[in-house]
Image: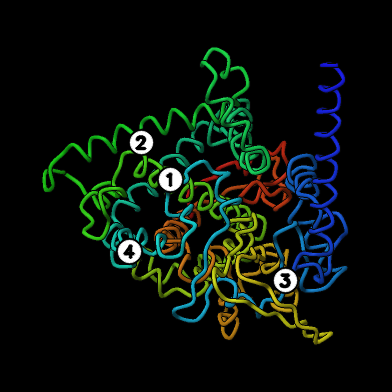
């Protein structure tokens, strides 16, 4: 009798589970307020559709979404909760709304980075504003100009690297192709982990519960490197918190946050500042390095662009950062490098917490209402390759930004838009133009490198080229002049 009762219980649970699944599918497909939005049949029903293209293809969902827009039009339902809009005239509604209208982030997207108390992971509009206000002085245009000598000191190391490479005949800055491949694999492991964590966040929780002797077997080397890096950051944060105001030999972002009068004590914990610093380093290295690599490749692959740049720079060979701001072609190259770097390549949806947003398809004139709480996104791929804005979008063409072309800067999403725009954009721009100037002082030749080594082929939160790429490799001939 007990066996029969237990069997009945299991059957009842199984039936309940099946009913629950069918109800979920039914409600997502027919009862959802997004049910009238065009799109593939599977995407509204299950997140496995997105997971397949993100994790198993891999890194292809942004490209699939572009294909879906070509098939279904400017508005497409791409997950059970999320809507993608490719219309560039809707960008401000998504990312830069009118004053007093709030935009939250989607926690389902930001949790993948594992730095949940950083400014980038601040879901709530007001919390993000509070955190940003404390950092704004550190990353202002004025602060970056004051920081220019330190940037130049780092950029000057390129001169030393190029000199060594010229004398030794090495064609790889790392001087070891095997090490380059290993490091590239480690970085790829970290970036792929972002997509994996997005869909299987529970795995990270389980691994953290395991002893190091077991968890170490499954953690990629790149992730191990990141964990070691976070330990260093935590130590520096603790030192900043333990020191007294005014005792520092140099200013740092840790000190800026520690001394912020607008942040409560709960926003100044070691964990909070560790997350903040980790995000700033992650966001400020890989994306800028990507733009520098793209600029470097295309300057060498297109000698006419390099010649034009050198001619423009020759008028003031010792130009300061302030002077560089006044050189149009240099900035056109930087803009084009940022456009083809695609910035944050993954979708970065915004949510209107209390306002119903409406989108009207300009072709059909049909209006779609998007209720509060709906994640709405586009992607840098959709915008930066929009042929109505950027003719021959995959061609590196700085001339597109000259004259009236500079007006298309309003369509640039490399640093996002609106109140959540990248806080470090002025610093990133300064690093990029100063690096381009330094690279133009040397004659080099590409070695074993082609356009696929810099072209956006996989979305791993940043634009990733072919997975076996060793990066941009060159042979240094000598200094110009």
Res. 412 in view:
yes
Q: Foreground mark, 4 or 2?
A: 4
Residue 240 lies in what quarter of the image? Answer: top left
**How far from the left and from the top, in percent, is residue 402?**
57, 79
218 up-or-down from 329: above or below: above
Horizontal relation, residue 268 to residue 353: left or right: left
Nearer to me, 408 or 377: 377
Specify which label sits upstream in the sequence, 2 or 3. Answer: 3
Residue shown at 83% from the left, 60% from the top:
29
Residue beneath disc 4: 133
Specify which label sits upstream in the sequence, 4 or 3. Answer: 3
Asked if the residue at tag 3 contacts the one at tag 2, i.e. Cβ–Cβ closer than 8 Å, the answer is: no
216 up-or-down from 387: above or below: above
**Secondary structure of the residue carrying numbered label 3:** loop
Nearer to me, 274 or 283: 274
**Secondary structure of the residue carrying numbered label 4:** helix
Specify which label sits upstream in the sequence, 1 or 3. Answer: 3
Nearer to me, 97 or 354: 354
Q: Residues within 10 Å of mark 4 (few under 14, many from 20)?
A: few
Separation of marks 4 and 2 at Cα, in angstroms: 22 Å
Residue beneath disc 2: 233
Residue shown at 82% from the left, 52% from the top:
23
**Disc marking residue 86:** 3
Separation of marks 1 and 3 at Cα, in angstroms: 30 Å
Residue 73 lies in what quarter of the image? Answer: bottom right
**How far from the left and from the top, in percent, is residue 457?**
74, 50
Q: Foreground mark, 1 or 4?
A: 4
**Disc marking residue 281:** 1
């Amino acid at each position: 009798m007990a066996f029969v009762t237990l069997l009945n219980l299991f059957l009842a649970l199984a039936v309940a589970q099946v009913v629950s699944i069918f109800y979920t599918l039914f409600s997502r497909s027919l009862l959802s307020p997004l049910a009238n939005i065009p799109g593939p049949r599977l995407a509204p029903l299950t997140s496995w559709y997105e997971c397949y293209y993100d994790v198993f293809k891999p890194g292809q969902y942004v490209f699939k979404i572009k294909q879906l827009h070509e098939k279904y039009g400017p508005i497409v339902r791409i997950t059970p909760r999320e809507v993608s809009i490719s219309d560039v005239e809707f960008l401000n509604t998504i990312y830069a709304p009118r004053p007093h209208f709030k935009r939250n982030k989607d926690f389902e997207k930001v949790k993948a980075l594992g730095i949940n108390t950083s400014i980038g992971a601040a879901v709530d509009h007001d919390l993000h504003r509070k955190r940003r206000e404390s950092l704004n002085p550190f990353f202002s245009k004025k602060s970056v100009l004051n920081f220019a000598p330190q940037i130049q000191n780092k950029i000057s190391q390129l001169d030393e690297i190029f000199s060594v490479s010229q004398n030794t005949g090495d064609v790889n800055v790392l001087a070891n192709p095997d090490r380059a491949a290993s490091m590239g694999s480690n970085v790829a492991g970290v970036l792929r982990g972002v997509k994996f964590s997005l869909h299987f966040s529970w795995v990270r929780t389980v691994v953290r519960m395991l002893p190091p002797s077991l968890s170490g077997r499954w953690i990629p080397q790149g992730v191990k490197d990141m964990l070691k890096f976070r330990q260093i950051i935590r130590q520096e944060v603790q030192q900043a918190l333990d020191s007294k105001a005014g005792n520092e030999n140099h200013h740092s972002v840790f000190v800026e946050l520690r001394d912020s009068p607008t942040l409560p004590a709960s926003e100044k914990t070691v964990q909070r500042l560790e997350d903040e610093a980790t995000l700033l380093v992650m966001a400020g290295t890989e994306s800028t390095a990507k733009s520098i690599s793209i600029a470097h490749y295309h300057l060498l692959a297109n000698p006419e662009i390099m010649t034009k740049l050198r001619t423009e720079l020759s008028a003031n060979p010792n130009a300061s950062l302030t002077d560089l701001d006044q050189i149009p072609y240099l900035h056109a190259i930087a803009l084009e490098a940022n456009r083809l770097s695609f910035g944050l390549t993954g979708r970065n949806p915004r949510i209107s917490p209390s306002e119903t947003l409406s989108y009207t398809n300009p072709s059909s004139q049909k209006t779609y209402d998007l209720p509060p709480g709906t994640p709405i996104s586009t992607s840098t791929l959709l915008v930066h390759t929009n042929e109505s804005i950027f003719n021959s979008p995959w061609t590196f063409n700085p001339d597109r930004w000259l004259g009236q072309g500079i007006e298309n800067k309003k369509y640039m999403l490399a640093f996002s838009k609106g109140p959540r725009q990248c806080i470090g954009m002025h610093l990133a721009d300064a690093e990029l133009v100063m690096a381009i100037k330094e690279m133009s002082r040397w004659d080099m030749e590409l070695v074993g490198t082609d356009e696929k080594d810099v072209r956006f082929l996989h979305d791993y939160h940043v634009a990733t080229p072919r997975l076996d790429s060793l990066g941009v490799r060159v042979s240094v001939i000598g200094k110009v002049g």
